[in-house]
Amino acid sequence: MRPGSGRTVGVSGNGKGSELLEFEEADNLGDEWEEVDVSETDADRVAKERDREFLSFRERITDADQFKVEGAVFDDATLAAIYTLVQHGHIDAFGGPISTGKEANVFLADGPDGEVAVKIYRINASDFKHMREYLEGDPRFSGLGSDKKAVVLAWTRKELANLRRARKASVRVPEPVAAERNVLVMDFLGTDGERAKRLGEVRLENPETAYEVVAEYARRLYRAGLIHGDLSEYNVVVHDSALYVIDLGQAVTVHHPNSRDFLERDCRNVAKFFSRQGLGIDATGGDLLEFVTEPEADPS
Ligand SMILES: Nc1ncnc2c1ncn2[C@@H]1O[C@H](COP(=O)(O)OP(=O)(O)OP(=O)(O)O)[C@@H](O)[C@H]1O
Ligand SMILES: [Mg+2]
């Protein structure tokens, strides 16, 4: 089955209308990398100065049950980054853990406008080699060297920039709120503290439509110069009867030397998942790849 043929799917915009325009526009694809600044952050300074207020905050947060249960041991600079986000008004209170992954812990938290998700990349635990695969060969990251901290900090900024770009391209993603050092705050997808389920965790009533939506998202990302790089049933969630793409840290621009391989793998993984749903989909992902990379019709 070829996606996008026939009826249209409900993926127009992200339901938030004009907010899409709030983000700064990059002039050219890839320009947002220029923003990546891995010099010492406020959080590093706070951690070094260890002022009294920070020390008491650190004590409270490291005593909090959710951090103990998760065995999440964050260094002072990470705690200072959380502290800075609290001071800037992005986080009011911490809730429980949502996920403990290979590279990051995700927590539920209260923000000024409701629930937010706080994704904390662990600098020491991060699979540094894997991250480098996505950064290497990209001239915009050539100055980064092999400093682990700098790579993880760049990764966090990259996820924020990718979320913004995806939103601008009318792909539903969690709205990014702020990033500080290795900590990213975004809208929480879920209801009453219960995270939205991943595509692989639900029984799809209408797998054809879901496939068309994911295909359309991949195409919109591609047309906005982005390749997700880890697109699968694990990184698409169902929220408010709509599909959202998450986990854009590894997403690369089309300039990346391996971008074609990443795109082919994404198409293969998505096709494999949907062919398991009994759809007559080419599981090698060839059709999907063709759909995603189809040149845009000339508007004139
Ligand atoms: N904004 C969000 N709202 C609700 N849940 C979220 C949000 N972001 C992440 N999650 C949940 O946390 C999980 C892990 O997040 P994410 O995929 O971004 O991190 P990851 O580094 O890939 O983790 P892993 O190594 O487990 O794949 C997701 O599968 C999802 O269930
Ligand atoms: Mg993930």
Image (cartoon, rainbow, N blue to C red):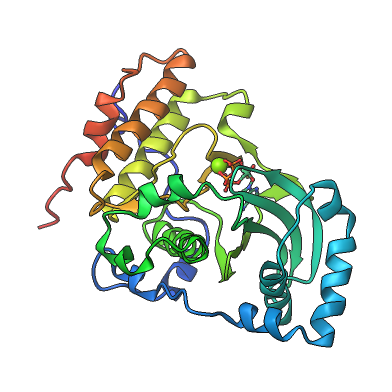
Residue 126 point in image, percent of width and height: 56, 50
In the foreground, 298 or 135: 135
Q: Which residue shows up at 35% across the image and 70% down it?
A: 32
Residue 194 point in image, percent of width and height: 76, 44
The tally of labels here is 0
Q: Is residue 173 above or below residue 52?
A: above
Which of the 4 image quarters holds residue 82?
A: bottom right
- Visible residue check, residue 241: no
Q: Is residue 90 above or below residue 193?
A: below
Residue 267 point in image, percent of width and height: 34, 31
Q: Which residue shows up at 74% across the image and 55% down it?
A: 108
Which of the 4 image quarters holds residue 80?
A: bottom right
In the foreground, 262 or 133: 133
- Visible residue check, residue 270: yes
Residue 270 point in image, percent of width and height: 41, 29
In the foreground, 249 or 233: 249
